[in-house]
Image: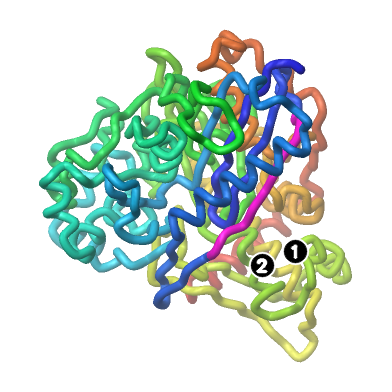
């Protein structure tokens, strides 16, 4: 068997483990969902032990399907839900509390208080981020204010904190290494985006002891080696890590400044490579680290819509309008348009460029003639329209007109949604044959880290098979839809 790169793609609702060969072809994969915990309105948690069990189950499934010898695994890459935070005991490995998920809004008051004190501009200048419950820094503030004895435990050196990548490396290494990569660290509100180190002033403002934070490394360094992981040998290097959206940007081969991608998952996430210098947004977009390879740091602009595929799940699970998520396309095609219905999927607030945590989902324009198909089509249109606003803001900040957008993630399989996106953006949509770009990006990074490949120049030929969608509507029709959307967003 050829060398195998094992990728752990730890997502919001489940974990996928993908085995790639040295040519970055998928050998096999395994997937396991885990519990979503909603202890109060707006609160979202995961049990860290559930996450780890899902990793092991997915790993076992992928290995059994592949027929590979575990000794063929030469490198491990990790990509993960980024802003989810967890705290655990360094000695026992026991979590002090459930992981607080990126979708959770419990720290809204903390963020508002910091804004009232005039701190937002400092955070924006130092981190490229806005003060929002989305990011993990205020989640750590919440832990230290609400988990009994946590601060005292931290003063004794017992507390480890981090994002999910940090937790996974800790588990994979048998508790030997407490590390993160620069892309995940750039999502915490605690890392200075230019020095790429934890910022003492920001940690102090958020009441987070610096002693609990992991070491920050580049995206292709060796983060640790496997120790006592069921099913695989000891000593395999974990040598590629990036947060899920940065991994997708890398996996989409957006290596040049101005190239952009959109990943359609639970939410939708647009990232544009902006090169070696951070661009600070005038339109409430985020400045983030795209990746760091050796001594070269690449930055990106990012806009996130918190709800994308989750809106389709709501039609399935909340309203029982469809049986399976994939059914939405056939249903929506039963009507030529939304019949004037507009759906703003602000179930957990609005992300970029609005950043309104108080906004809520809204359906406008209902008539007696509205049916299930109109609603299904309006949901797809709402997903696409969120991305239009983000991309317009990106073009304004970067001073670059986007000619094409690369897409990936589960909902990118939906041809109607992709056509809507092309129509409403007025630009070409490119969907590669391999739409699991997040896992592929982590495999690329691990491949570089393990020396299986030398640099990105060896990866540009991966995307020779793709499907494209061109806009089929005129400017007037596009503007009419956008006008209807802006009115609805104002009411959300």
**Does residue 436 appear to the left or right of 83 in the view shown?**
right
Q: Earlier in the sequence, mark 2 or mark 1?
A: 2
Q: Residue 356 location in percent, x, y? A: 39, 64
SS for callout 1: loop
Of 304 and 171, the residue lying toward us: 171
Q: What residue is drawn where x is 18% and y is 48%?
A: 208
SS for callout 2: helix
Quadrant location of residue 122? top left
Q: Residue 200 location in percent, x, y? A: 14, 37
Give the distance between the C-alpha atoms of the residues marked 2 and 1, in whole angstroms.
6 Å
Task: Pick the quarter of the image with the N terminus.
Answer: top right
Q: Residues within 10 Å of mark 1 (few under 14, many from 20)?
A: some
Q: What residue is drawn where x is 37% and y is 42%?
A: 187
Q: Is 434 covered by the magenta stretch?
A: no
**Does residue 141 appear to the left or right of 241 in the view shown?**
left
Q: What residue is drawn where x is 59% and y is 15%?
A: 456
* Residue 269 visible in the picture: no
Q: Is residue 296 above or below residue 119?
A: above
Which segment did they paint magenta? 26-35
Q: Residue 372 location in percent, x, y? A: 78, 79
Mark 2 lies on residue:
313
Mark 1 lies on residue:
325
The answer to whether the residue labelled 2 contacts the one labelled 1, judged by CB atoms less than 8 Å apart, is yes
* Numbered circles on residues, count: 2
Q: Is 34 covered by the magenta stretch?
A: yes
Of 441 and 269, the residue lying toward us: 441
Q: Residue 466 location in percent, x, y? A: 80, 32
């Amino acid at each position: 068997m050829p060398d195998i790169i094992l990728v752990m793609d730890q997502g919001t609702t489940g974990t996928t483990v993908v085995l790639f060969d040295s040519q970055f072809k998928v050998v096999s994969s395994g997937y396991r969902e885990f519990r979503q915990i909603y202890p109060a309105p707006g609160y979202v948690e995961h049990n860290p032990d559930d996450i780890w069990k899902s990793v092991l189950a997915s790993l076992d499934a992928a290995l059994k399907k592949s027929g590979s010898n575990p000794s063929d695994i030469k490198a491990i890459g990790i990509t993960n839900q980024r802003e989810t935070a967890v705290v655990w005991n360094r000695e026992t490995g026991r979590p002090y509390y459930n992981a607080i998920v990126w979708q959770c809004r419990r720290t809204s008051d903390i963020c508002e208080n910091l804004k009232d004190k005039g701190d937002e501009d400092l955070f924006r200048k130092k981190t490229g981020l806005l003060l929002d419950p989305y990011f993990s820094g205020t989640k750590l503030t919440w832990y230290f204010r609400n988990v009994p004895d946590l601060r005292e435990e931290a003063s004794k050196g017992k507390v480890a904190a981090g994002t999910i990548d940090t937790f996974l490396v800790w588990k994979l290494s048998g508790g030997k290494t407490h590390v993160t990569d620069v892309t995940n660290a750039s999502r915490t509100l605690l890392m200075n985006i230019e020095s790429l180190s934890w910022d003492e002033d920001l940690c102090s403002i958020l009441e987070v002891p610096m002693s609990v934070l992991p070491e920050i490394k580049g995206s292709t360094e060796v983060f640790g080696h496997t120790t006592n992981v069921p099913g695989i040998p000891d000593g395999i290097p974990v040598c590629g890590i990036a947060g899920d959206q940065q991994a997708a940007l890398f996996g989409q081969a957006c290596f040049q400044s101005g190239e952009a991608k959109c990943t359609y998952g639970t939410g939708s996430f647009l990232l544009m490579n902006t090169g070696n210098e951070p661009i600070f947004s005038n339109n409430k977009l985020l400045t983030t680290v795209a990746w760091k390879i050796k001594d070269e740091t690449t930055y990106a602009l990012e806009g996130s819509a918190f709800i994308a595929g989750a809106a389709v799940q709501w039609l399935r699970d909340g309203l029982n309008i469809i049986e399976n998520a994939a059914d939405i396309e056939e249903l929506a095609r039963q009507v030529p348009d939304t019949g004037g219905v507009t759906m703003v999927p602000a179930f957990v607030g609005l992300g970029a460029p609005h950043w309104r945590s108080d906004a809520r989902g809204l359906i406008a324009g209902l008539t007696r003639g509205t049916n299930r198909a109109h609603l299904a089509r309006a949901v797809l249109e709402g997903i696409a329209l969120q991305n239009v606003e983000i991309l317009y803001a990106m073009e304004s900040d970067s001073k670059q007109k986007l000619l094409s957008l690369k897409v990936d993630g589960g909902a990118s399989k939906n041809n109607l949604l992709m056509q809507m996106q092309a129509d409403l953006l007025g630009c070409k949509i490119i969907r590669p044959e391999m739409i699991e770009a997040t896992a592929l990006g982590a495999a690329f990074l691990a491949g570089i880290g393990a020396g299986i490949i030398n640099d990105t120049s060896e990866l540009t030929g991966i995307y020779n098979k793709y499907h494209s969608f061109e806009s089929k509507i005129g400017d007037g029709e596009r503007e009419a839809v956008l006008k209807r959307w802006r009115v609805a967003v104002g009411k959300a």
